[in-house]
Amino acid sequence: MTEIIDILISASFWAAVIRIASPLILATMGELICERAGVLNLGIEGIMVIGAFTGWMAVYQGMPLWGGVAVAMLAGMLFGLLHSTLTVPFGLSQHVVGLGVTLFATAAASFAYRLMLPEVTSPPKIQPFQPLDIPVLSDLPWLGQALFSQTALTWAAFAVAGIVAFTLYRTPLGLAVRAVGENPAAVEAQGLSVTGLRMGAVMVGSGLMAVGGAFLTLSAFSSFFFEMVNGRGWICIALVVFGAWKPGKAVLGAILFAAFDALQIRLQQTSMGAVLPYQLFLALPFILSILALILMSRRAEVPAALMVPYNKGER
Amino acid sequence: MSKSEGAEVVLRLDRISKSFGALKANDSVSLTLRRGEVVALLGENGAGKTTLMNILFGHYVADDGEVEVFGQPLPPGNPRAALAAGVGMVHQHFTLAGNLTVLENIRLGTEHLWARRHPDARGKVERLSRDFGLSVHPDAKVCRLSVGERQRVEILKALYRDARILILDEPTAVLTPQESEALFATLRKATGLGLSVIFISHKLHEVMAIADRCIVLRHGRVVGEVDTHATDKGALAAMMVGGELSLPRAEARAPGKVLMQLDSVTTPDHGAVPGLKQVSLALRAGQITGLAGVSGNGQAALAEVIAGLALPSAGTLSLHDARITDWSPRVALSNGVGRIPEDRHHQGSIGDFDLTENAVLEAYRTRFSRRGWMNWRAARAFAQEIIAGYDVRCPGPETRIRLLSGGNMQKLILGRAMASGPDIILANQPVRGLDVGAIAYVQGQLIAARDRGAAVLLISEDLDEIMGLSDVIHVISQGRLSPGFARGSMSAADLGLWMAGQKFEGADAA
């Protein structure tokens, strides 16, 4: 027990929590935008792989780090365009298209990797984002290390969450996005384009997912592996539900999940880790997430038109 | 002479035509609307009223013809242009987002997407709701509002955009009589302030009450245009259906033996909706039992008990003098209970199933399958039989049922319920939302079922319907059931006192 308390009060634990949460927050915000507009984007897992790959490759080819982020975002938006073209104007099944995009994107990353680096056995490293030194805040005892020694991309993740929340709740655009996920006929009747809003939301959302993927190669690690996204996309879909489709609650969910993840790594090194099989620790964040999901999502208001294609003029 | 004769013409539809495949929904329809005038667009379901208005509003593009608003031609297929020209439409199925507040719904689409909020939106909405008598709280979430309140939000939405022409598509279909009165008061205020209204309806008494002029559509064509004060309901009805038509009235008959008996049946309350309180009711062969009452007073609970969807928490149910112990929808069906559910879209049919599949929903395990395999040939033949026998107008049995009009959907459900020759027929709001022709048809079928010896329970909120068809009338109020009143023994006003629950107190004391 004291071992767990020791972990929880260590500054390095909280620094890890924030770091693990960052890509989840970015991709969760992306998924949240899509779903608020009425489109379930199961392409998230593959789009994160594409983001991780293109961002890293751009930097490896000599672009600046922020250039890599921009390239990842553009690549994500391109896959978002593919997804939304099939699901919005053509009204195809969002499940089938989403899984298809994930398979296609993952395979495309693999193909491009082999094409561009045919001779390489282990992936080359890049110089990733470094923790920012913020005057005063970073020098605070404990807090400075726990919360204020993060990379610029982490700060960007939290800023994105704020911008998404502000846009959804404080601007006419956000109003239109929330309405199009609830009752597209209402949007149509007010003279706005259902197709435009939904495609736009999916493209921007997919761009954010790709940046979430790029966080892994450009900030968390310094290289690209095929297995590195490792189900984070699916976690983000659960986090949107956990957050009841609200940005603030979704960020809390991401931090909670990250905390469980950081905790399980550290628990493996304690005396408990010597007794219990390590797989149990690996499963811990998922088990706790499922429990939290059950508790939190009872009264959630699902966007009423989520996964319902809009066909103009149909009864 | 209409009161606004000579006033400025605000809207002119000129020879509008529109076809959907082989169907001519609008055939050279022309219409003018003047300032301060209410024009009723009257016609049966499928006559082309809604299509015409959707063309005006830019949801559809006409094949031919022109629309002029305030003397300016309106570009086709552009709702934005229609809104900008001052046309506001209140759709039959509300176009509101339930997760947003009233104010948010009203503001939606009125501002540039990137701009900050309109500073005085709230003030304008409050002013409009005061001026037009449309009281609704601007910060209430739409999903928590009643149907009447939602309609007020729809009207506010149009007024907020400075609409000068209001189109209301079947606005009273979902309202209580009191709410309809309030709506008419609002419309009178609006025309007094110089707005013009197109009122789409198939309810004749409302058209007579509110409209200055009536335009009657049939099969997509204008078949008549009359000043309301120069005509009467009978003439309008004849124009709508293309001939004289009277609603069936059932003649009195001697009742037969009791087929189903409820004794002191009680069911639990569901929140604000009361359950049944010690209800005793006998359904007799050859008799239509009418159940009158304001919606939400226990009608649903009674229907659920009879259909086997709910079990009483106290009291007993007997069928043919035998007490029922094991009761479920399947047992009810196999014991000859035919059901016409209250909500034909959600309980009565599966929208994306075709007519064949919907037709066999109640009997697919028994009549239409053998050793676990569906007999689709028999199923299709059965669907064809209903389509022909009950005049279901549709392209064929492969049509998805959601594409049918309400009347045709109801005829299929009616045919399905009647196919097994049920002894007991539970008809819950069987004609709600149907047009005159379909109402006459459905009611005629219920009377025919009675005449061959079935016991019919007719649940309706429409007193005229109850009084016209029932051999015996019960009133339900707060889950309590009144004694049965024989045909003609009670006036509508007397029944109204029972519906309001006042008479129950007297009966309890006695």
Image (tube, grey):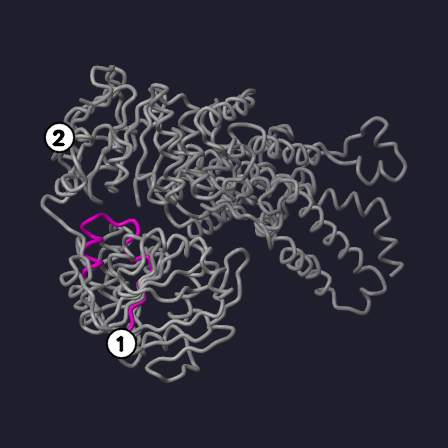
> Which chain does tag 1 point to?
B
- Which residue is under mark 2? B28
Instruction: Report whether B298 appears left or right of B289.
Output: right
Identity of the residue drawn at 52% across and 26% down: B126
Identity of the residue drawn at 53% across and 62% down: B269
Does the magenta-highlighted stretch encompass residue B155?
Answer: no
Image coords of residue B462 (percent x, y) = 32, 52
SS for callout 1: strand
- Which residue is under mark 1? B369
Does the magenta-highlighted stretch encompass residue B442?
Answer: yes
Which region shows up in magenta? B423-444
- Neighbourhood count class around disc 2 (C-alpha, 10 Å): few under 14, some 14–19, many 20 upward: some
Tell me the quarter of the picture where residue A158 sits: top right
Nearest to N terminus: mark 1 or mark 2: 2
Image coords of residue B225 (percent x, y) = 15, 30
Q: Are marks 1 and 2 in contact (CB under 8 Å)?
A: no
Closer-to-camera residue (B411/A57): B411
Tally of numbered discs: 2
Kind of residue at disc 2:
Ser
Tell me the quarter of the picture where residue A248 sits: top right
